[in-house]
Image (tube, coloured by chain):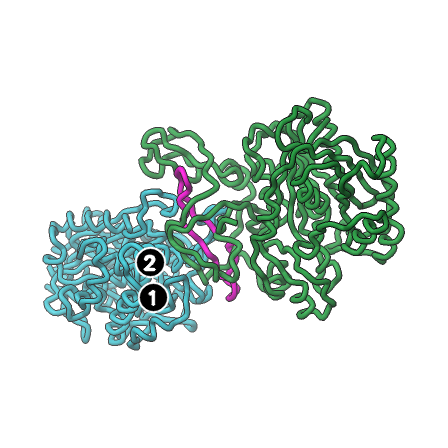
Amino acid sequence: MAAITSCNVYIPVWRLEREEIAKATGFQSLGGERSVACWDEDSITMAVEAASGIVESANSVDALIFASTSSPFKVKQAASLIATALDLKSDIFTADVTDTFRASTNALIMASEMADSGKYKKILVVASEKIPVKPSTLYEQLFGDGAVALTVEKGGDGSEGEAEILGYSSHSKPQPGAWMKAYDDSMKDFDMRVDARFGYAANLQAAVMPLFAKMGLMPADVDRLVISAPDPKSYVGLLKSVGVKPEEFFFDKVGILGTAHPFLLLAHHLAKEGKIVLGSYGEGSDAFLIDIKSPLKSNLDKMIESKKKIDYGEYLYFREKIGERSYPDNPSPVKYWRDEKSILRFYGMKCRNCGTVSYPIGRCCIECGAKDNYEEVKLSEKGRVYTYTIDNLLSPGNYNADGVHPHVVAVVDFDGGGRAFMEVTDTYRGKEEIDIGMEVERTFRFLNEKNEFRYYYWKVRKPR
Amino acid sequence: MEVAIIGTGVTKFGHHWEKDQEDLLVEAAYEAINDAGVEFKDIEAVWCGTFYPFSGISGNNFSDPLKFFGKPISRVENYCATGMDNIRNACFAVACGAYDIVMAAGVEKLMDNGSRGIPYIEGIFPPYMPAVSAPGMFALAANRAFKEWGWNKEDLALVAVKNHYNGAKHPKAHFRSEITVEKALNAPMIAYPLGLYDCSAVSDGAAAVVLTRPEIAKKLVGDEYAVIKAIGMAVETIHPWARPSESFLSFPATVKAAKMAYKQAGIEDPMKEIDFGIVHDCFTITELINYQDMQLCKPGEGAKLIRDGVTAIDGDFPINPDGGLKSFGHPIAASGVRMVCELTRQVLGKAEGLQVKDAEIGFAHNLGGPYSVAAVSIVSRP
């Protein structure tokens, strides 16, 4: 049977207290805090972050499935871009699974079948969300931003850290639920109570009962219920109705991560042995019986702990609700495509004549000028600041200065060679501490949108 | 190579909202012609520098404002060294005898495109690279110098104070008031650690020179001409931040251009053999590093020169007695030409109120782009 063999979480560093939202908007606080993606993060960049933590060898992955309801593209495959940023092989299978908060578990079913077929050795499934919401709405407090990546392989070889997928079943049912039409810019719903009362519990039950029947199980055979929900109240209500004590739902710490939420809960539970039922909800439900034979490590706790507070004003800036964003250049998508190896895969060149590692890849060596005599080398994820500045004449992302957010840039010497000029991100209005010699790590980010095209690139940040 | 400067023309530098590029160029070109005592019909060829794409196009940059038609005109563009590179090209043409009398002019009308830093140029850097402003580029060097040599913001402020002290007396400077160290230190931050007074201003202006060979100069103006003894120039990478060997503590383009110029002029110890200099003080940190790159002191000792008053107008080696870019602002292509005009004024003893004592020979220096282009010229009495 297929098994989940590794798990990695990415929660953006920024947290917005719901009390802070309430103070600014007058909307009643739901308590706790939610995670907020930086202005240069989206579901694609967070997917890269989550996945990069478990892709040890780029050659080992032969399929990547991206699950999200908030891809920045309607037409353009996110999975192929993510695979490229991860420097995966180009002959792998890539797919986006979208449009429902069940997309993640849809993808997990696909991955498990692919592993079982024996045709795919390791499938990377990444669920990622940055759900667009209107300020001063319930959804603004409900959702959080983040991503979770899993690898699925053929299991049962008794190796360390393995959660075997014993079986699954699905139930499909259109509900009024929450929706976004093709051109909507934020989540809509008719009345969440309709779903809460007639959709959620009924759909879960309709998926779980056949699973129990199929597996010949009684509820008592299951150690824990790992069930996602559209809101924390529905979650508590469901678990109480079946006589189970509600567990950590991460609403106070992160918020609901949309389709990534079932995986977030799973990441939490994978750390402990036992048989679990994993359930998702969205236009129906997917249910899995998973046997965690030996616990899987994840970085979930670290991601929860590593955080910085953000105020509501900065949150509105992150979401482009306030402030001016004008970009002076007209970049060419062709250049971007042509230099993919340097831009997205972050390869530099190592001169065979003088040994210098430099970035980006060019025809002649920047130190000795040797022509066409180099090998392509991938630069390290970590490096140190050689020098830097905090530039008030520009704003982050190469935008024209807005008078509030300076552009923090650094000359970075990457471990093992290669020097590049990098934007320093995850800074609060440039007031971040930065110094010569400081360690930084690469992070894949949205760069800018210009000429009707959306550009991504690597930046650096203080290590999380 | 020895080329004679027989006429100079410089407009007032500043925010010329009411004037067009045409006005500035006509003003500077006619002043140079009149100073040389020649007429436009005597000018056989022109080199006209403008850096920005919006500054105009090709030879028409010069032909149309002056209605100077039917003769060879080249447009030169080489970052902040445009002005001096422009003169360099004109020099070779007269020196080799192809022409007898030529003009080299530089003009830049920046204020029409706004005053918040120099305008951004599309496509200059790859789309993915973080953009950086001009102060940002040089701030990279300042932070490194602070770390490496223990220089500080006060050292930078001393440069601004010195140059504004000189510039306050120059009738054509953009800024004509002195400042204090305290004022410089308390100014708004532009690109850390460079504050407002560490930066030269965006400005409009034009400058022109009339060049010929010394034997013709003697016939036209007697002894009233200056001699260009050398012009060195070097181009380095546009991506200093990608070159592992780049120290950010020296600008290799300057080092190489200076070496060339010193060699051409037969100078072995510039501190002893040259009387004064005009360096590219686009930012205060640049001036301090220039001292070192121009071989006036050892690496790391630049700040000591300003602290000890060596480069003050009455010091052992006055630097920027005219007030520098700090006082004039920096209309890119005009600056290098203006600097050569200033050298001429000084060596001819015509720098009223700002005359360096016994100034017989001086150098001027331009540094442009991400420190990627530098030019150094040496001018003396005949």
Q: Amino acid at mark 1?
A: Asp
Task: Write down the colour of chain B.
Answer: cyan
> Which residue in the structure is indicated by mark 2?
B142
Chain of the residue where label 1 is placed in the rendered structure: B
Towards the viewer: A259 or B260: A259
Q: Position of residue B317 (x, y in %)?
A: 15, 64
Q: Colour of chain A?
A: green
Q: Which residue is mark 1?
A: B198
Residues rendered magenta in the picture: A397-423
Q: Disc 2 on helix, strand or loop? A: helix
Residue at 88% across / 46% down in the picture? A202
Vertical side of A64 occupied by A181: above or below: below
Which residue is found at the position 53% from the left and 41% from the top? A336
How would you rate the neighbour count of disc 2 (Cα within 10 Å): few for under 14, some for 14-19, many for 20 or more? many
Image quarter (top left, top right, bottom left or bottom right) of the N terminus of chain A: top right
Q: Is residue A357 left or right of residue A405?
A: left
On the image, the x and y values in percent for residue A239 come to 81, 49
Count neighbours of disc 1 (C-alpha within 10 A) and say few if under 14, some if 14 to 19, many if 20 or more.
Answer: many
Q: Are marks 2 and 1 in contact (CB under 8 Å)?
A: yes
Residue furthest toward the front?
A: A220
Query: Is A233 left or right of B15, judged from the image as shown?
Result: right
Distance between the alpha carbons at the discs numbered 2 and 1: 11 Å
Which of pointers 2 and 1 lies earlier in the amino acid sequence? 2
